[in-house]
Structure formats: structure tokens, C-alpha cells
Image (spheres, rainbow, N blue to C red):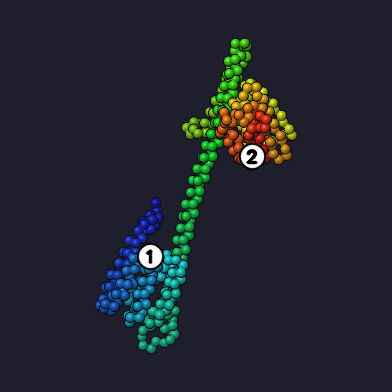
Amino acid sequence: MPLVERWHRWSRAHIWAIDATLAGLLVFVGLTGTVDDYGLPGTAIALAMTVPLAWRRTRPVIAGGAVAVAAYMHLAVLPAMNAVAAFAVPAAVYALAAYAPRWATNAGLVLGVVGGAAAGARYFDQYEGRTVFATVTSAVLVAMFVAGVWAFGRMRGLRLREMDALTERNRLLELERLKEAELAATQERTRIAREMHDIVAHSLTAIIAQADGGRYAAAANPQTAADVLGTISETGRRALTDMRSLLSVLREDSPREFTTTPGVDDVPVLVDGIRTSGLEVTLSVAGEPCAVPEGLGLSIYRIVQESLTNVLKHAGPRAHAEVTLRWHSDRIVVEIVDDGRGAAALVEARPGGQGLTGIEERARLHGGRADAGPRQGGGYRVCAELPT
């Protein structure tokens, strides 16, 4: 760390100690030449002008006011200028300009200029035959000197305020960055949880349905049971691959695994897979399909997947489901309806659960909306409208 920076940090941490030391030196100098020359009044005025300087930065208004009162008493009482005044008054004016509020800064300028002009007129032209011009010149020079000190103090104050503003801005930016990182982490956790739910719920539901069908078909048709076991194996491998790819995002000590992200074009394959699980599903497409972003395609796929998974779990035996993709010029409508138990399933098993919440979140993520609920006359309906 550079020496200047170290000194700056140390001095800011020990402001009062530094100012008290300097004030103590001025007190010593003032008392040395004042006690013998001006007696008790001069000593009291010298102390009143120097002691408050110990608080010139921590309490600038109080310290500056005390020095101003003592300086004007000096003008009224002492016949000659005390050497302490030549240091105390400029120090107080500088501190007011640099560290005090705006009103105290302006008041310090007025009091300093007026007092400096009065001191110049009274003390700096004490000789026989002095002229008015010399008196006015002395007053103007001292007043300009005090105004110059105030200007330097004002520049210092503006610089300090600018540094404080930059420090606060950096603090707010850092806080904003931390909040954004926390929000991003929360969103990522939500996304991973949603994907895990879709993968696990769909895969296990399909495996259970296929296993039940294979068990009933094993006695009458061993070949069908063997085909069902193959489907179960394929479904399990696909789910395991998807899980590994998803969980690799959370691992920092191993390379990430990537799989192809499913989209709208994979919906027919998904429907065929559900159909092999024993559910009658039909797929219809209306309108002219168009290319959609990868994220939107994944959301459409997951909405269909979650809806059909809920049909498998809750619609009951011999249910039929229909998947409809209606393409419009600016949006796509995804509708999944079934003729199962509908409202009765709500009481018995709460269809969807987190899955329905995930469907709504996916739709809102792309600026769309999703509705789900029982149909009149039986069955259940999920409808999502997403802008393309």
C-alpha cells in the first residue's frame, strides 16, 4: 500500500487526535507570547481562539463560532495583533468552508472577510503619517487573503463530498450486484427445481403405468411384457441422462454434461411415448407452425409433458386425452383436455400440484398466461397461450 494512502487512512481514523495536537501547539505558542504582553485578557482570548481548533473538523460550526467570537473580542480589546490570530482565524475559516453545512460556510466567509478587513485596517498600518489609501489597501489585502483561504476550504469540501458520493455510489452498486446475484441464484434454483419435477414426475409416472400394464400382460402375452420392459428401460435411461445433465450445473468439480433440449418438434415423440404407457392420446396441429426460440420450445414441451403426466396419474382408467397446438401469427395456444374424473381428482389427489405452478410460471416467463381447471361434464383442461 502506498505511503500516501496509508497516511490518508490513518489520518481519517485519528482526526480528533491530529487536530488536538495542532491546537495544543498553537496554545503553547500563544501563551508564550501573550501572558507577558497582554496579561489576563490576552491570555483568555488566545485560549478561546486556539482550544476550539481541536474540534475544527469534528464540530466545525461550534469551533468556528467560538473562534469568530474570540477574534472579534481580539479586535475590540487588544491594541496589537496576537501572533496566534494569524493562524487560528484562517484555520477556522478553512474548516468552516470544508466541513460545515452550506449556511455555516457562507456565514464563515462573511465574518472572515469583514473581520479580516477590520484587522487589516487596524493592525497592519500602525505608523505615523499613514494615508487612507494605505489603510484601505491593508484591509483589502487581508480580506482577500481570508477569502482565498475560504476558497481553498470550499474546494476541499466539494472534493470530500464528491468522494463521499462516489463511495456511497460504489456501496449501492455493490449491494445491487449482490442482490442481482442472489436473485439470479434464486431463479436458477427455481428453474432447476421445475425441470427436476418435470423430469422425475413424468418419467416415474410413465414407468409406473408401463410396469402395471406389463404385469397384467405378462401371463397372457410374454412378448408384450418384454416390450414394456424395454420401454421402461428406455424411459429410465432418458430420465437418468436428463437428471445428470441438470445436476451437472450444480457441480463445480466435474465437467458439465449437455443433452439436446426438447422443443415443439419433439411433442409428437412425447405423445407417442405417453401412448405406449396405456393412455389414449391424440395430437392435432392447427395453423402454420413457425420457428420459435429454444426456451419457448422447451416451455411448450414441458407444458404438454406435465399435463399428460397429470392425466396419467389422475384421470383414471380408460381416459382419453387430446393435445392441440394452434398456431397464430403472433402466438401459439397449447391445449390439453381429457375426459377423466376432472373435479373428483381435485379432492382425491390434487392434480398437478407443483406441476401446475410450473406451467403457470413457464407461461409468465415468456409473457403469456395459462389456465387449468375441471371441465363441465367431466375431465380436465389445461390451456396455455404464449406469444411467439
In this rendering, position of residue 75 left or right of residue 192:
left
The quarter of the image holding the C terminus is: top right
Front residue of 280 and 32: 280
The residue that mark 1 highlights is 59
Query: 78 or 8, which lies in front?
Result: 78
**Residue drawn 38% across the image and 68% down it:** 62
Q: Position of residue 367 (x, y in %)?
A: 63, 42
Nearer the camera: disc 2 or disc 1 = 2
- On screen, residue 82 versus residue 237, left or right, reads left
Q: Earlier in the sequence, mark 2 or mark 1?
A: 1
Question: In the rendered view, would you say 85 is above or below 166?
Answer: below
Whether residue 353 is visible, yes or no, is yes
Residue 241 locus on image (x, y percent): 56, 26
Residue positioned 62% across, 24% down in the render: 316
User: Is any part of residue 145 visible from this angle?
Assistant: no
Q: Judge whether 388 appears above or below 245 on screen.
A: below
